[in-house]
Image (spheres, grey):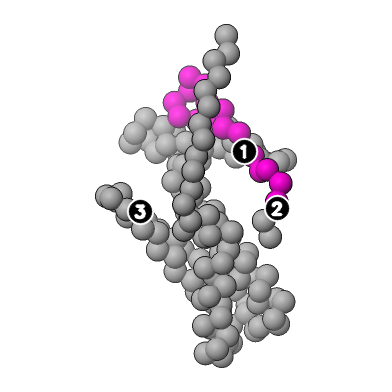
């Protein structure tokens, strides 16, 4: 589950449109934009990472719970989508479970899906403190 220590990630972009190197702990990824907006589509867009974070967190949380409770679950698939932004951002999370669950277990899994750390973060007030440092 979520650590109590400060977590960080780093994004670095040079002059190469819009290829961005991402680092977190010992992992490296690339973010980019699609061809139609000037990128080279070498990685997910930033919004894709938001959707993937919620989908993977939900799936992992459900797997942990199902394993701990010894539920008969073979596979968990989570699809997260969101539409155009107006006044409010709405994410839709569709959870598909392959296995045998009672109605009570199914209801509990739905409750647990909403308790993953990313879901909790996105559904609570979030404050972002941004600082700028100029380096010559």
Tag 1–tag 2 contact (CB < 8 Å): no
Residue nearer the viewer, 101 or 107: 107
**Magenta range:** 4-20
Q: Circle 1 — which element?
A: loop
Query: Magenta span: helix, strand or loop, mainly?
Result: loop
For residue 113, what is the image quadrant? bottom right
**Reading the chain from its start, which is encountered first: label 1 or label 3?**
1
| Residue 125 to residue 75: above or below | above
Q: Circle 2 — which element?
A: loop
Q: Circle 3 — which element?
A: loop
The residue carrying mark 1 is 9
Mark 1 Cα shell of 10 Å, populated few (<14), some (14-19), many (≥20): few
- For this view, does 3 lie left or right of residue 53? right
Residue at coordinates 71% horizontally, 46% vertically from top-left? 5
The residue carrying mark 2 is 3
**Reading the chain from its start, which is encountered first: label 1 or label 2?**
2
Instruction: Answer whether residue 22 is magenta in the image.
Output: no
| On-image quarter of the C terminus | top right
Location of residue 47 in the rendering, given as x and y in whole percent from the top left corner: 44, 46
Residue 34 visible here: yes
The residue carrying mark 3 is 89
Location of residue 46 in the rendering, given as x and y in whole percent from the top left corner: 46, 42
Location of residue 29 in the rendering, given as x and y in whole percent from the top left corner: 60, 39
Residue at coordinates 62% horizontally, 79% vertically from top-left? 73
Instruction: Answer whether residue 8 is magenta in the image.
Output: yes
Residue nearer the viewer, 52 or 5: 5
Using the numbered discs, state the Cα–Cα distance from disc 1 to disc 2 in whole angstroms: 14 Å
| Residue 130 to residue 122: above or below | above
């Amino acid at each position: 589950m979520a650590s109590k220590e400060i977590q960080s990630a780093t994004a670095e972009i040079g002059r190469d449109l819009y290829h961005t190197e991402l680092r977190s702990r010992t992992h490296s990824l690339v973010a980019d934009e699609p061809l139609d907006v000037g990128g080279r589509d070498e990685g997910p867009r930033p919004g894709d990472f938001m959707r993937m974070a919620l989908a993977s967190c939900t799936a992992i949380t459900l797997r942990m719970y199902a394993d701990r409770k010894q539920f008969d679950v073979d596979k968990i698939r989570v699809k997260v989508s969101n539409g155009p932004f107006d006044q409010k951002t709405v994410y839709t999370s569709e959870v598909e479970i392959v296995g045998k669950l009672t109605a009570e277990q199914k209801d509990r899994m739905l409750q647990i899906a909403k308790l993953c750390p990313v879901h909790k973060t996105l559904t609570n007030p979030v404050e972002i403190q941004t600082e700028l440092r100029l380096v010559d």
